[in-house]
Image: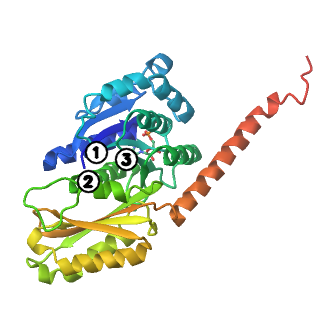
Amino acid sequence: MKVALIGVGQAGGKVTERLAQFDANMGYGAVQGALAVNSAKPDLQSLEFVDTQLIGADRVNGHGVGGDNELGAEVMQSDIQEVLGGLDGRITSSADAIVVVAGLGGGTGSGGAPVLVHNLQQIHDIPVYALGVLPGQNEGALYQANAGRSLKTLAREADSTLLIDNDAWHEQGESMDGAFDRINGKIAQRVGLLFASGEAVDGVGESVVDSSEVINTLRSGGISVLGYASEVAAEDASDNLRTTMTVSRQALLTGTSLPDATQADSALLVIAGRPEAIPRKGVEKSRRWLEEETDSMQVRGGDFPLDSDRLGALVLLGGAERSDRLEQFMERAREAQNAEETETDRAEALTDDRLENLF
Ligand code: GDP
């Protein structure tokens, strides 16, 4: 699937850069163009492999919007023509979709991404997806509240919102900065493989995935989730039946970007590995298992020829919003927002005009 990527905010820019690099290093050619947009100039200057666009310079002078996602939304809306103009050359007629990438807990990405998606929808016929990163549980209340509002709006505006929970691929005891780097690598590999799997690949396996199958899996809208797992494989397909089932199960049950999301309207199962090592029967069995496990009406599938001694399973779920984890997150965001409002009320207690000043 050929995509144009636009990263908004710091996390959005960093993840977009990793995705563009992964695609170029692997030689997949799925990423048609990548642009990073931010109101903070230093964040843009640290990116090397993507084009950049500063927004909001007249309001915040390149210093960013802090954690103010309403300001993030405003500066995106004010400079929307520059951003859309900066994309012209990238959204060639060969792009199958546009993907807007952002961390949802901050300011620029949180507020700017939904505004950008909304505007892109007005002028492009191809699907506009969001790739949104949810803050980890131990990030502060402002991040949770910001992410809740941002996600609600993104889910309304985007054709589908692929969610990555920062706690999902975070290892215990790891510092958050070290973790971000590793998580970004994982996002790049998994999402990069998803984009590439919808491309015609040389060395063709028996049934390669077409980009329309990715798009159809995401057609139900709402939230989508991506899972991945891999294991060392045997030489012959006939010895890899169990491995194919194991990686498929792990991809869904322990490897998804939003833990516990197993219910979906539709799913796509891509088995990646050397074509001679992929067992047809194992793939069929895994697909049927996935259909039952996710309760979905449609499980699409295909191979992704990859010259590797491992066998990998990539699972994409579309319409996966009936998840406990998501419900818990929205609850956390609502509580955080209420707490913020109480704080504001307290701050305003001294200026409450139901009491009169002495003079
Ligand atoms: P913005 O620049 O104002 O959009 O805000 P940031 O992108 O800095 O932060 C928004 C959220 O993104 C934070 O709450 C973190 O959860 C997350 N985040 C920040 N940097 C990274 C990163 O490099 N990788 C990942 N996965 N998440 C990040």
Q: Viewed as shown, does residue 287 lie left or right of 344?
A: left
Q: CA distance from mark 1 to mark 3?
A: 33 Å
Judged from this view, the residue extending furthest toward the front is 125
Residue 126 in sight = yes
Q: Is mark 1 within 8 Å of ligand 1?
A: no
Residue 55 point in image, percent of width and height: 42, 24
Residue 99 point in image, percent of width and height: 35, 43
The residue tagged 2 is 211
Please say if the residues under marks 2 and 3 sit with CB atoms less than 8 Å apart.
no
Q: Mark 1 or mark 3: which comes first in sequence?
A: 1
Question: Which type of secondary structure does the marked residue at label 2 adopt?
Answer: helix
Q: Residue at x 55, y 57 (%)?
A: 329
Q: Is mark 2 within 8 Å of ligand 1?
A: no
The residue tagged 1 is 96
Please say if the residues under marks 2 and 1 sit with CB atoms less than 8 Å apart.
yes
Using the image, determine if residue 256 lies above or below residue 152.
below
Q: Amino acid at mark 2?
A: Ser
Q: In this orientation, which residue lies closer to the viewer: 40 or 120? A: 120
Using the image, determine if residue 254 lies above or below residue 222.
below
The residue tagged 3 is 177
Q: Amino acid at mark 3?
A: Asp
Residue 254 in sight = no
Q: Viewed as shown, does residue 230 lie left or right of 315?
A: left
Q: Is mark 3 within 8 Å of ligand 1?
A: no
Q: Amino acid at mark 1?
A: Asp
The mark found on residue 191 in the picture is none
